[in-house]
Amino acid sequence: MKYNGGKILKNAEIMRIMISMSCILALLAAILSWWQISSVSHAYSISLERGQKFKVIKSLLEAEHLLGDERGYTNEYLLSSVNNESNAKVALDINRRKTDLSLEQLSDVPQITTQIIQFKRVLDETRKTIDNVMSNPKRAPAEINTALDSSLDTTKIFNEIMVNTSISYASSDVSVSGYFYNLMALGEIRDTLGRLATPYIYALRFNKPLSAEELYASNKRKIRLDMLWSLLDGFKYDKTMFSELNTAKNTYKIKTSFLINSIENNSKNGMPTDTNLDLFLIQYREGLSGFYFMESEYIKHLDNVFHAQTTKALSRLIAVIVSLLGVLFIIAFICVFINVKVLNPLLSLNKTIRKVIGNRADDQVIDAEGMSEIQRLFESVDVLDSVFKEHKAESRELTQKLGEDPLTGVLNRRGFDEKVLTMSLHENAPGMRVLAIIDIDFFKTINDTWGHPFGDDVLVGLAQVLQASCRKDDIVARLGGEEFAMILHADSHEQAEKILTRCQDNIREMKFPTEGDDFVSITVSFGVVKMDTAPIDQLMKKADQALYLSKRRGRDKISWGNEL
């Protein structure tokens, strides 16, 4: 009997279908692998970049300390007696070579290469000035004082390079800004204390009181020290570092501060001091030893922190690569398994069916085991499907976390930018949209008074109120610190004003319990702008200006961009 209807697949067609399915599976696995590896490798590259920035700041600090040592050796050289002059010169030359080597290494850092090269020229000129003064056997005290001032001015130039670089690195990465600012403050304290000593050494060497200008400059350096110490208040959350900071400050006051005050009091009365120069130098160095030790310990701590971050990111990258290679191996194994255990029996079955249709069924017997392998094929496909679904869910979860603020649960800056871009491309809602920037009033005072955990509770509570005040399609995000953003849909300006006012009232009614029976309330300032076709960065800038207007008006205000 002949078969005249339907369609029988040829062996080549079956192979093409199976090969196509295998290729599709491999392609999907490759896409998923690339997505996950890209995400994890980005985190690893960020950790490497942070570690590199830390190394640059550490190298800048080391160079600054060598310049400070050179300034100290310069002081000894310029103020030394004839008998000690040659020894002082040898010590100064050794330190100069160390300084040059450190600066040479810094010149390889692309971000500061030009600044370091320019500074080296200034340093060379300063050294020539000092050597010229010392080459004159009849040098006057005024010439020595000029050389001392030149040394101070030169180290100040390098200090500005170090500070500007540290601030640039800290402001570009909020996650590690605290580390960089603390390290900068410690280096600044050490440099300022070193600079503070120069006029006193000069006055003691020539047995003369400090001038009014020198007293004024010293007072400014003391004020700067107080400011730098206040920058290190963050150490109070680290008991060990905070204890070392207090110990260093007390050592300075006991060993050094009283000597400085004694010299200043005599100078104000126009009298030279009877303090011995050698005793002053010994006690001054002892007074600074605590800061040297503290800075060294903090650098070791940061070495461990950034090394741990990089190691953790690298371990995660390796783990992801290994797991994805495992998935690819499983897919390859399944493809081979299909070919050996399923495709061959299926081709044999198809061949037998064609022979049955051609009335030649007796030529070949159907392999029952091959039929069972086909069933197992479907089971394997089910397993593979579950693996893909699991990885897809993990990918969605990772993407969501990247755009979400971990503390408040609202969008972070990255998620906000992506949401705004999507909204600009796809949304054509009627009415109007407004962008509001919200900033908590006196939030630093709240943190300083009640602690950062309490401040975190305030941020979470504010985020909840902002979300509750919005519609489903509105956007709430935490841009950073205590600053939030909202994008609201409204039918009119008046309706938007009502929504913001209601939100402001709800915030005023919030109560945050303290450790006692008291409650703390907060207020916020709004900067609002109507969204149009302008780029989002321009709208954000205009909203920020409106926010500053609210702050100037006394806070707890809603200011619109069109009021500017």
Image (spheres, helix red, strand yellow):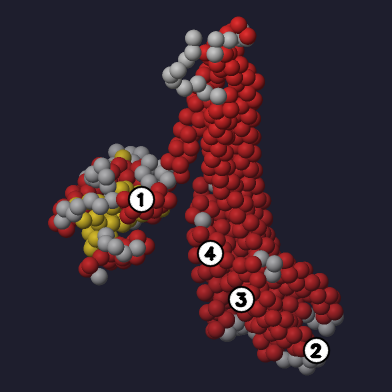
Residue wearing tag 1: 422
Question: In 3D space, how far apart are the residues under numbered discs 2 and 1 (Cα atoms)?
Answer: 72 Å
Question: In 3D space, how far apart are the residues under numbered discs 3 and 1 (Cα atoms)?
Answer: 47 Å
How far across and how far down the image is residue 72, in percent?
Answer: 71, 73
Q: Looking at the image, tell me whether mark 1 or mark 4 is earlier in sequence order.
A: 4
Question: Residue 523: in sight, yes or no?
Answer: no
Residue wearing tag 4: 168
Residue wearing tag 3: 157
Residue wearing tag 2: 135
Label 4: which secondary element: helix
Q: Looking at the image, tell me whether mark 2 or mark 1 is earlier in sequence order.
A: 2
Front of the two marks 1 and 4: 1
Front of the two marks 4 and 2: 4
Classed neighbour count for the residue bearing mark 2: other residues with Cα under 10 Å, few (<14), some (14–19), many (≥20): few
Q: Are marks 1 and 4 in contact (CB under 8 Å)?
A: no
Left or right: 496, with 449 as reference point: left
Classed neighbour count for the residue bearing mark 3: other residues with Cα under 10 Å, few (<14), some (14–19), many (≥20): some
Question: In 3D space, how far apart are the residues under numbered discs 4 and 3 (Cα atoms)?
Answer: 17 Å
Q: Mark 3 belongs to which amino acid?
A: Ile
Which residue, as the protein is rendered here, is positioned at the far front? 1
Front of the two marks 3 and 2: 3
Residue 417 vs residue 230, the one in the foreground? 417
How far across and how far down the image is residue 275, in percent?
Answer: 68, 74
Question: In 3D space, how far apart are the residues under numbered discs 3 and 2 (Cα atoms)?
Answer: 26 Å
Q: Are marks 3 and 1 in contact (CB under 8 Å)?
A: no
How far across and how far down the image is residue 21, in percent?
Answer: 54, 30
Residue at horizontal 62%, vertical 9%?
364
